[in-house]
């Protein structure tokens, strides 16, 4: 009766915009918006009754943040989460993923999917490295994706480590590698890593590992088999001297940036001033998640909302719902002007 729902996935309607509530009630009655409990509730109500119901709920005090269903807090965005998770990597792989330690690979300039696959391989033991396995053990798939995103968006810089080898000879030997790794070591993407700017010692050791089988990869074993130690060092020196390039990955929007887009229609902090657009400030988080998932999946039909929600990840939806659930709802009074 106070318009504040205690039921999961059922929205608060206290303080909601009266014209919006009225339009939705009419849509349920006409069957253009399908929800059987709602349709049954309004089936025998006249339009005057629907107007009165909408006016009643709009007149109530608006719910405050942290009402039932409000999320505790918004999650950090993927990039911030990736940066935080990558803190422990800097000691070996350098700040921002640029190695300063010979034998330790740089992580910048690598395709996001390649880096995720590499981390998972350490976790499962498909790649043999005891320290890396222990570090990866406690990370989730979301952590892998966030870490890879963070490094993919860092400025690509060559490893700050020595070059040992003949770069000219290495360039000639690298002709056979170009089909997979690019002419200058910049790969077109996963599953082949970019080699440009990588630490030379790490590259030489990796080639030796492919040759002796301690790294198990059928596609690399054959090309590495005829290489001697000098050729491996020359190849490594050539690739290490090349300029790495940023992989093709788009920086995701933060929750604040997404909310800025939502506020264009739903009003500042979700307090709509348009009578036909719902206020979403202090709404139940579980309901907001359900609604956004419905638009994204096509269960709810609205061209603008469908287009917007298609770009949202599940994490984006959860964070947006938490954001708006914590905003203070504010009432709006509509004053009809007499016709001239």
Image (cartoon, grey):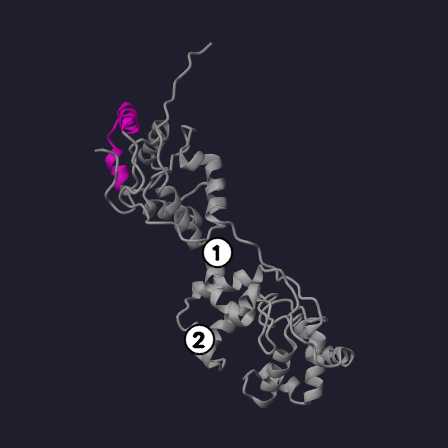
**In the foreground, 73 or 159:** 159
Indicate the position of residue 20 as horizontal and vertical percent values.
37, 31
To which quarter of the image does residue 206 belong? bottom right
Indicate the position of residue 7 as horizontal and vertical percent values.
24, 45
- Farthest-out residue, top: 340
Report crowding for label 1: few under 14, some 14 to 19, many 20 or more residues within 10 A (C-alpha).
Answer: some
Note whether 43 is above or below 186 in the view shown: above
> Is 313 left or right of 42, judged from the image as shown?
right
Instruction: Tell me the CA gap for discs 2 and 1.
Output: 23 Å
Task: State the residue at coordinates (65%, 64%).
Answer: 157
Task: Determine contact: label 2, label 1, CB under 8 Å.
Answer: no
Of the 4 image quadrants, the one containing the N terminus is: top left
Indicate the position of residue 48 as horizontal and vertical percent values.
28, 23
Note whether 300 is above or below 80 in the view shown: above
Q: Is residue 299 visible?
A: no
Q: Is residue 265 visible?
A: yes
Label 1, on which residue?
80
For numbered disc 2, what is the local secondary structure?
A: helix
Point out the stretch of residues depicted in magenta.
Answer: 37-60
Q: Which mark is residue 123?
A: 2
**In the foreground, 83 or 225:** 83
């Amino acid at each position: 009766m106070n318009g504040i729902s205690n039921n999961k996935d059922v929205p608060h309607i206290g303080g909601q915009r009266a014209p919006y509530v009225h339009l939705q009630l009419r849509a349920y009655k006409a069957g253009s918006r399908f929800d059987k409990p709602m349709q049954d509730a309004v089936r025998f109500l006249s339009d005057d009754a629907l107007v009165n119901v909408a006016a009643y709920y709009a007149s109530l005090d608006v719910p405050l943040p942290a009402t039932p269903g409000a999320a505790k807090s918004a999650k950090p965005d993927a990039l911030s989460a990736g940066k935080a998770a990558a803190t422990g990597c800097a000691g070996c792989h350098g700040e921002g993923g640029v190695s300063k330690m010979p034998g330790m690979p740089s992580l910048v300039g690598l395709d996001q999917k390649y880096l995720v696959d590499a981390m998972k391989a350490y976790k499962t033991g498909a790649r043999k490295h005891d320290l890396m396995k222990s570090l990866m053990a406690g990370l989730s798939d979301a952590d892998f994706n966030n870490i890879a995103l963070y490094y993919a968006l860092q400025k690509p810089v060559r490893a700050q480590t020595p070059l040992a080898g003949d770069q000219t000879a290495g360039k000639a030997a690298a002709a056979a590698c170009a089909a997979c790794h690019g002419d200058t070591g910049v790969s077109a993407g996963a599953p082949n890593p970019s080699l440009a700017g990588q630490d030379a010692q790490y590259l030489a050791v990796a080639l030796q590992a492919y040759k002796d089988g301690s790294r198990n990869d059928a596609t690399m074993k054959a090309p590495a088999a005829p290489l001697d130690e000098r050729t491996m060092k020359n190849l490594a020196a050539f690739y290490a001297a090349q300029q790495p390039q940023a992989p093709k990955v788009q920086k995701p929007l933060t929750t604040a940036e997404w909310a800025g887009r939502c506020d264009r229609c739903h009003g500042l902090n979700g307090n709509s001033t348009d009578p036909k657009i719902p206020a979403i400030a202090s709404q139940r988080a579980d309901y907001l998640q359900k609604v956004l998932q419905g638009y994204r999946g096509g269960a709810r039909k609205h061209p603008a909302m469908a287009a917007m929600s298609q770009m949202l990840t599940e994490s984006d939806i959860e964070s947006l719902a938490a954001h708006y659930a914590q905003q203070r709802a504010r009432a709006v009074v509509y004053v009809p002007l007499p016709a001239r």
